[in-house]
Image: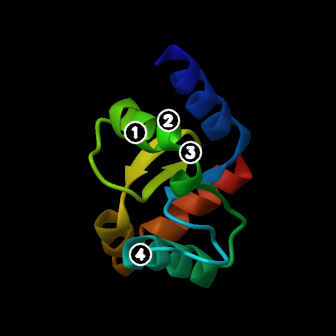
Amino acid sequence: MSEVKDKIENLIGQHKILVFMKGTKLMPQCGFSNNVVQILNSLGVPFETVDVLEDSEIRQGIKVYSNWPTIPQVYINGEFIGGSDIMIELYQKDELQQMVEVALAS
């Protein structure tokens, strides 16, 4: 598990905004992942994705790492934010834009 944890931490550390999701930002493979991609696209911010369908170790490992049972999972500036529902909520409250701006400015 430590190899997977290191891999996950490395990925999170490399990107200001990272989404662990089913599919890619160009081809989301589930509705929840698509919601997150649409929200981030609407904010016009750069973000990276990790397709958990291509790596079963990451798929299981990220759930353990974040102590969060579902995919997608969004990390901003190394901090776990949540999944689709939380992203929608933050977006609707206009809190997500500020979080993203702070992350990209740092």
The answer to which quarter of the image holds residue 64 is top left
* First-in-chain label (3 vs 1): 3
User: In terms of depth relative to the viewer, which is nearer, 105 or 12?
Assistant: 12
Q: Which mark identifies residue 80?
A: none
Q: Distance between the residues labelled 3 and 1?
A: 9 Å
Residue 8 drawn at (x, y percent):
57, 33
- The label nearer to you, 3 versus 4, is 3
Across and down, in percent, residue 93 comes to: 34, 75
Mark 3: few/some/many CA within 10 Å (<14, 14-19, 20+): few
Q: Are the two marked residues, 2 and 3, in contact with CB atoms closer than 8 angstroms?
A: yes
Q: Relative to residue 78, is residue 44 drawn left or right?
A: right
In this rendering, does residue 79 appear at all?
yes
Q: Write down the residue under mark 3.
A: 55
Q: Mark 2 points at which residue?
A: 57
Q: Which residue is drawn at 36% across and 68% down?
A: 84
Amino acid type shown at disc 3? Asp
Q: How far apart are marks 2 and 4 (CA)?
A: 30 Å
Under tag 2, what secondary structure? helix
User: Badge 4 is on which residue?
Assistant: 91
Q: Do the residues labelled 1 and 2 touch (CB within 8 Å)?
A: yes
Type of amino acid at the residue the image marks with label 4: Tyr
User: Disc 2, disc 4: CB below 8 Å?
Assistant: no
Label 3 to label 4, Cα distance in Å? 29 Å
Q: Quadrant of the C terminus?
A: top right
**In terms of secondary structure, where does tag 1 sit?**
helix
